[in-house]
Image: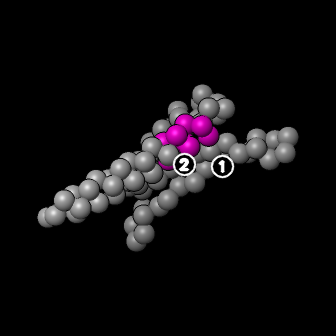
Amino acid sequence: MGLFDFLKAKNTTAATAKNRLQIIIAQERSSRGAPDYLPLLRRELLEVIKKYVNVDVDAVKVDLIKDGDHDVLDISVALPEGQQG
């Protein structure tokens, strides 16, 4: 491994770390104005769904979306393929 290869590897690692940090910051910014009950709602929904289907922890997404003057609760559940209840 040459000197330049080593520096190039560090650069890709730094870019990956930067991208991950940007994602975390974007998530934090989007959840600032969110109600406090959303994380609890997400956990409870996950518990109920797990009673019937084996899903991953990241399978349930709960978001609050502004639609004009109204707030819309958007719930998305990614179910595994080929699994029957």
Q: Position of residue 5 (x, y in %)?
A: 22, 63
Helix or strand or loop: what does disc 2 sit on? strand
The residue most toward the left is 1
Q: Position of residue 80 (x, y in %)?
A: 42, 64
Helix or strand or loop: what does disc 1 sit on? strand
Apparent side of residue 45 relative to residue 68 in the rendered image (left or right):
left
The Cα atoms of the two marked residues, 1 and 2, are separated by: 8 Å
Q: Check disc 2 and give the amino acid type.
A: Lys
- Residue placed under numbered mark 2 in the picture: 61
Label 1–label 2 contact, CB within 8 A: yes
Q: Say which of 74 and 68 sits in front.
A: 68
The residue most toward the right is 69
Instruction: Write down the quadrant of residue 4 in the picture.
Output: bottom left
Q: Check disc 1 and give the amino acid type.
A: Asp
Query: Sequence-wise, which precedes: disc 1 or disc 2?
Result: 2
- Residue 72 visible: yes
Apparent side of residue 11 relative to residue 32 in the rendered image (left or right):
left
Q: Position of residue 65 (x, y in %)?
A: 71, 45
The residue most toward the top is 36
Residue at the image point whose x is 80% and y is 47% from the top:
67
Q: Say which of 15 and 80 sits in front.
A: 15
Q: Residues within 10 Å of mark 2 (few under 14, many from 20)?
A: some
Q: How many numbered marks have been drawn onto this rendered protein structure?
A: 2
- Residue placed under numbered mark 1 in the picture: 74
Residue at the image point whose x is 84% and y is 45% from the top:
68
- Residue 56 visible: no
Query: Coloring scheme of the render?
Result: one colour
> Mainly helix, strand or loop, the magenta region?
helix
Quarter of the image containing the N terminus?
Answer: bottom left
* Magenta-highlighted residues: 23-30
Magenta-span inclusion, residue 12: no
